[in-house]
Structure formats: C-alpha cells, structure tokens
Image (cartoon, grey):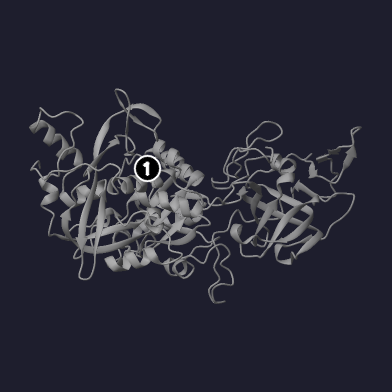
Amino acid sequence: MKSSSNTSVSGDLISKKRNGKGSVSSAEPINRTDQPRDSSAKAVSVVSMSKKSNGKAVLCSDVPMRHIGGTGVSSAKTHEVMFFKDVRFGPQEGELRFRLIHFWEARNPIKKVLIGIEMLLIDEQGTVIQGFIPPGRIDTYLPHMIAGSIYRLTNFYGSRSKTVYRVAEPIVAITFSWTSVLSVFEDSSVHFPEDRFRFNGYEEFEAGCDLGGDLYGKLSTSLLFVTGFDYVGHIKLVGEQALTAGLVLDEVEIASSRRLMVHVQTHDGPVMKLYLWDKVATDFCEKFKANGNTPSVILVTTVNPKRFGGALTLSSLSSSRVFLDLDVQPTRDYMTWLGSNTDVANRVNPDIVTKAETVTIGDLFSYIKHEGSKVAWFECTATIDDVVHGSPWYYISCGGCKTKATKGHTTLMCKKCGKAEVTGVAEYLTKLSVYDKNDHGFFVLLGDAGRELTGKPASELVERYFEANESVGDDHMVPVPQALIDTIGQTRTFIVKVSKHNLEGKTRSLTVTKVLPLEAAAADGNLEENVIASAVEETLQMGKRVNGSSSEHEGSTDAAVKRSFDGDESEEAKRAKCG
C-alpha cells in the first residue's frame, strides 16, 4: 500500500504479502502454531541506499541476514536485547523482541489525512506498548507485517505517544526510523503472550468519562486510566432489537451507515450503550453471522467513555477489536459465568445509565444559550397545551430509510438511497405547544415519537383519512387527526434533542426523539421500555462527535424540522376528526 492511498489499513484486514498470500486477521484468536516459519527470512531495512543516474535514492528494503545460533541477530552487529520497560526517549540501537498484536491506520480526525500506522505490541514480559510507522516508511514494512507474528526490531526511536492516539500505558512509543531493521524472530524457546486485556467496570469508565484522549495523569494515581482499556459483558439489545434466537442483523444498513449501537451489561451492573463504528461495526456483523447461534457475550478493546444527553456511553475507536462468545479466553470465562448466573444477568439495574439527564423547559433554553454547549439529549416532563396550527403534522418519507422523499415528475425519489422511485410512507413531524410549572415552549414530534404519544402510526391515520375522503387529491394535506388532538392536556415525559440548529439560534423548536410510556416512571422491569434512546438520531450525532465530521442526515433532519415550523412548508392544518 502506498502512503497516499485511501485503502484502509488494519491488522484486522487481509493485507497482501510479497508472495501474494493474505495475512491473518488479528480480530481472530491468535494461534500461530499451525503456520510454519521461513528459516530463510529476510530483514526489512532502509539502511542501504544507492543513487540512480538521475540522482534519486533507491531503497533496498530486502537485506539478507545470516543468523547466529537461534537468536536471529545480524552477524554485522550484535545488539543488546531490551524490554519495553527499558525504552527511553530518543534514538536507540538495542534489540526489541515482540508480538505484533494489532495494527491500524492513524488519520487526522479532522482532515482525514493518513498520519501513519499505529501498532499494539507485547513483549515476553507481558508489557504492552504502542508502535508507530511514519507514512513515508509504510511501503517498506507493511507488506511484511502479519498480526499475531513475532518480530525483532533494531535501531528505533523512542518518541512521545501522541495524546489523541494513545491506547497503551507507556508514554513512550516505538517509532520506526530510517535506520530500523525489522525481521521475524524464530526462537521458539522464548514465549510471548498472545494478547493482554485490561478491563474496566462502570465506576472506572464513569470516573474517566470525557477526559479526552490521554487519560493517564488526569486522575488520581490510585486510578490510572487510558482509552486503551477494554470492555467485556453480555449483550442486551442489538440496535433496538432484543437478543433472541435467530436474530438477523440489517447488514446493508449497518454497512451504509457504518455504525451500530449495542446495549451491554457487565454482570448485574448498569446497562450501557456501546457504539461500534466503521470497520468495528462490520467486524461485529461478520462475527455475529458466523457464530452459528446468537452470541451473548461481547468484548471490545480500546473503548472510549463519553457522555451524551447525561448518559454514560462507550465508543469504539479505530484501534478497537471485537470478540464474541468463544473467541478469546476472557469471553469464554464470561460465558461460563453467564451460564451459571442467568437470573443475575437478566436483572436490569434500576439505575439504567441510558437514562438522559432530567431538565425543565427553562433549563433547556438556558443550556442552548450557554456558550460551548454541544448537541445533547435531555429528559423533560411537560404538559401538552395544543397541536400547533399552520404547519403539516406529518411528512412523506422514503419507506426504506425514513429520509424525506422528494417529488419527481411521476414518482417519489430518495436522495439518501439514490433511488429514482421509492414507496412513500407518512411519518410524524408534529409541532406541539407545551408548558411546565414555569415556562412554555415548542416540541416537534419526529417519526416514532409520534406513535409513542398517540399509539398509532402516522401512516395509518393518513390512510384512514383518504379512505374516508376518496374525492380529495393525492396532494391534499390531511388535517390534524383526532388521535393527536386527544393528547392535549396530557402530561408526558419526552426525550428532547438540542440540535445544531437550536445552538445556532436558527429555531427554538426542540425535537422529540422519544416519548416515555405513562407507566415508565413506576416500572423498572422492561428493558426495552426503559432504554430511552432514538438509535437513528443518537448514533448519527455520536458519529459526528467521535469522528469530528458533520452528519449529513442529522443536518437534513434538523433542517426539515426548522423549515417545517419556520414557514417554508407552512399550510393550514384543519382539526377535522380522522382518527
């Protein structure tokens, strides 16, 4: 791979070796005993350089080595063997021996420019350290790297581990320099651990939440923390689907959206949302499908704790790997515990951490005005005063992705799906006037939130109206149905999103992504009713904040809300009974 290429590089991908054979994925349990080593292995080096007639340097990356004994040390010079704990800053000529656990691309989070290849290495003492290959040297070393293999490295540079990419405890990283020599280490008498996991519980993740990047040193010395910590637990929901036998994932949707939300729980602790992004989401789908039975245990490495809408969540990073059920020893151990403690595992902790922070309407407006506020979700209890006149109460969406469909000459089209003809489905987009003890505001019911309020899908109400009024045209706007009018006077608890448009002052209407059932305050048993997140809305914003890029679909949804209730699509909605 060339350093300027857009091809993804990861230890979990099948990369091509010089002989054309694929390397082994590091997402699988590492067991290399079935792979014979080539006793004539060559070292990879950039030491030797010659000049062509045009004056350009020629890289000699395959320098044969003559082995002395079983050590695999070059006959040209014997280097002192070092352990990772002995590595210091600056150039060093010692010899490191290690297993390559995993490697992945490091890109600038904003510009997405390739910075280099990050690696996770472990030595024979079990110390884990990060390695780094600068972009100009990727072509030299990447073709020879196989996740799980054992190598030795001489002539390297000890550099400071970059804060934003740090996933191991040492502050020093092993950087491949222009004099570095990498070769396969073949002494079978030296044992190297296959991996090392460092698990955290809810309390530790809570303590390290939102510290950002390098978390070492930001907490007390009694609690060292880093984004390199791992999570293991059992799965409660995948997306918003309960974990049942024969559960089928929507692989097409996950691949296109590059995200997946999983609700997880460790033993009888609180339930948390775990967001899997990009390749990690794809890997999860592949392993889930290949598992045979519906998997129940998940392990994700190098997760980052974040807080969204007052709830603690975990998010995968580009360095993350995912394991299920019997993949590795920790998942096997957890499977054993789960089999003996099903009653404990099925209990939902009453302190569900997916619960958003409770606020008043006044608190919401204060949050919007506060400098530095971010997009977030809140729980707000309010009384419905009216269904607002002068705006449609629904929109016509693409039946596949629920994005607003656009009208063509003879068909409905979907920009998101790229289809020239889609089936239109009515979805809620209803503006409510609401109040609490001190303040008044406007909430916009979006999608399934309307069904949760009325008990009826918008499509059913619209269809019922047209069946009763066959003489009206297809472009006729259905008046506000009785099912919505009947909600006036109800006091309900809403999950409200403070959007980018709210923060920019473009609209004061707040989007409702979920309406809690009336009995939710008293009930604590049903997980699916207590988990109060809109998977589509929340995962879109999660991607924006984790990856540092804007979300097209989130922006279009908020823009649609703004346009609908700032006059662009205004049309008088009559209050005729129709549902």
Q: Quarter-wise, where is residue 236 in the image?
A: bottom left
Indicate whether 8 appears above or below 115.
above
Res. 310 visible in picture: no
Q: Quarter-wise, where is residue 368 in the image?
A: bottom left
Q: Where is residue 36 in the image (x, y as percent from the top left)?
A: 68, 39
Q: Position of residue 49 (x, y in %)?
A: 87, 41
For the point 71% across and 34% down, the residue is 18
For the point 66% across and 52% down, the residue is 99
Q: Quarter-wise, where is residue 354 in the image?
A: bottom left
Residue in front for this viewpoint, 172 or 512: 512
Q: Give the secondary structure at mark 1.
A: loop
Looking at the figure, which quarter contains the C terminus?
top left
Q: Is residue 102 left or right of residue 476?
A: right
Looking at the figure, which quarter contains the N terminus?
top right
Residue occupied by mark 1: 293
Q: Is residue 167 left or right of residue 527?
A: right
> The residue under label 1 is which amino acid type?
Asn
Q: In this view, does 479 lie to the left or right of 186?
A: left
> What is the count of numbered marks?
1
For the point 59% across and 55% down, the residue is 195
Q: Where is residue 477 in the image (x, y as percent from the top left)?
A: 18, 37
Residue in front for this viewpoint, 310 or 300: 310
Indicate whether 332 appears above or below 246.
below
Q: How crowded is mark 1: few (under 14 residues within 10 Å), some or many (20 or more)?
A: few
Res. 96 visible in picture: yes
Indicate whether 476 appears above or below 93.
above
Q: Where is residue 545 in the image (x, y as percent from the top left)?
A: 47, 55
